[in-house]
Image: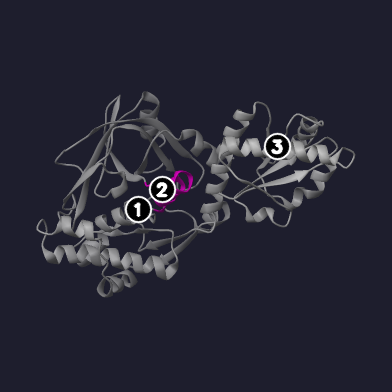
Amino acid sequence: MQIGVYHIVADNYNQESINNDGRNYLTKLGKLSGITFKKVTLNTALEMDANFIFVKSGGTEGLFKKAYEKLEGPYYLLTTGEYNSLAAALEIATFLKNNNEVCEILHGDIEEVANRVKFLSTVASAKKQLKGTKFGVIGEPSDWLIASSIDEEKLMNKYGVELVSIPMDEFLMEVVTNFSSNDKILRELMGKFSDKEVAKVFKVYGALKALIKKYKLSGLTIRCFDLVEKSSTTACLALALLNKEGYTSSCEGDIASLLSMHIIRCLLDQSSFQANPSHMSNTELTLAHCTVPFDMCSKYTFMTHFETNQGIAIKGTLPEGDVTIFKLSADLKSYVAYETTLIENLDEKNLCRTQIKIKIDECFKKYLLTSPCGNHHIVVKGHHKELIDAFLKL
């Protein structure tokens, strides 16, 4: 992360004393937060992943007002409590509030401030990373995803994400001409599936990698059932590999799931599992799908794709423990972020290959039954609701 600090200080103070105290404060704050701060100007601030405004003294309100239009929000105001800096920050924060800006004063116990600086830096860096992202959409979203398409203009305006439409025929041409292999997975597949079937899935993998390179994509989604119909194979293995390699990849042309998964990657640098809620009781929910990122699995085996009995799918085992269920709606207006526990990996015959059971409460059950954010939901290791909330609300 590149984190900037924009300094403002009034002239009617001892500059040497203020600068020494400010330097000591930022040094201590950097050690506690694990962040290296870089002093920025109005011209260099936009190069940073995030910026904090160091209100070093009173009498700086007018200086801030002049700089305001050249600084991007949200506005995070650092104060030391010395030289009337807190009083100035309060006036600046009120000015920002009156202009409908998001702002926060960071003041008090330095360890608490350091934790908050680290948290806000993570959120801001993730937003900067998401902006400028290009997603490939191969074919149209699957016919049954009637509530998962995202308006391209809204997506660009809100998050700076571009969708690149790639015709299925173009992808299929790449399948013919490309082959890419993962030696470890190749060795594991040999003898379990025919050489012809193994070659097919690695051609799909090679084709997707070729399109990522061609269009400079950060992620993609594919109308994968068309691939089954036209090539008698699946993208399950390719998507599992691509997610492990850091290219966020979703099934069925589901753009809303792709965006949700990539937000998780930007925030946490983790892969996530796109899954179907399949069975629910008052206290438990089963989720399943035929692909899962390899880096999420403690172990895995290979099977055919559930619905079609073709291609190669992954039956992964995910570690039990804390997980978060996340999904951003396709209209970009609502979302769910629910912290829970993965309690069991299942082996049911009539479900997609990777199957997990999580704990739920009445509130989450009501959400699914009365106001869901689509079919697929995203599973990520650990509890991250606070971070997700901040990303989507700040």
| Residue that badge 3 annotates | 24
Q: Earlier in the sequence, mark 3 or mark 1?
A: 3
Neighbourhood count class around disc 3 (C-alpha, 10 Å): few under 14, some 14–19, many 20 upward: few
Which label is found at residue 272? Answer: none
The answer to which image quadrant residue 380 occupies is top left
| Residue that badge 1 annotates | 243
Q: Is residue 147 visible?
A: no
Q: Secondary structure at mark 1?
A: helix
Question: Going 58% across and 34% down the picture, which residue do you hit?
Answer: 32
Nearer to us: label 3 or label 2: 3
Mark 3: amino acid: Asn
Task: Return the residue nearer the eye: 46 or 341.
Answer: 46
The span shown in magenta is 255-271
Answer with left or right where residue 269 lies relative to residue 393.
left
Neighbourhood count class around disc 1 (C-alpha, 10 Å): few under 14, some 14–19, many 20 upward: many
Q: Earlier in the sequence, mark 3 or mark 2?
A: 3
Mark 1: amino acid: Asn
Neighbourhood count class around disc 2 (C-alpha, 10 Å): few under 14, some 14–19, many 20 upward: many
Q: Earlier in the sequence, mark 1 or mark 2?
A: 1
Task: Return the residue nearer the eye: 330 or 344.
Answer: 344
Label 3 – label 2 distance at C-alpha? 40 Å
Residues marked 1 and 2 touching at CB (< 8 Å)? yes
Image x and y of residue 310, in percent: 16, 57
Q: Disc count in the image? A: 3
Q: Is residue 239 visible?
A: yes
Q: Secondary structure at mark 3?
A: helix
| Residue that badge 2 annotates | 261
Task: Return the residue nearer the eye: 254 or 385.
Answer: 385
Image x and y of residue 276, in percent: 29, 42
The answer to which image quadrant residue 214 occupies is bottom left
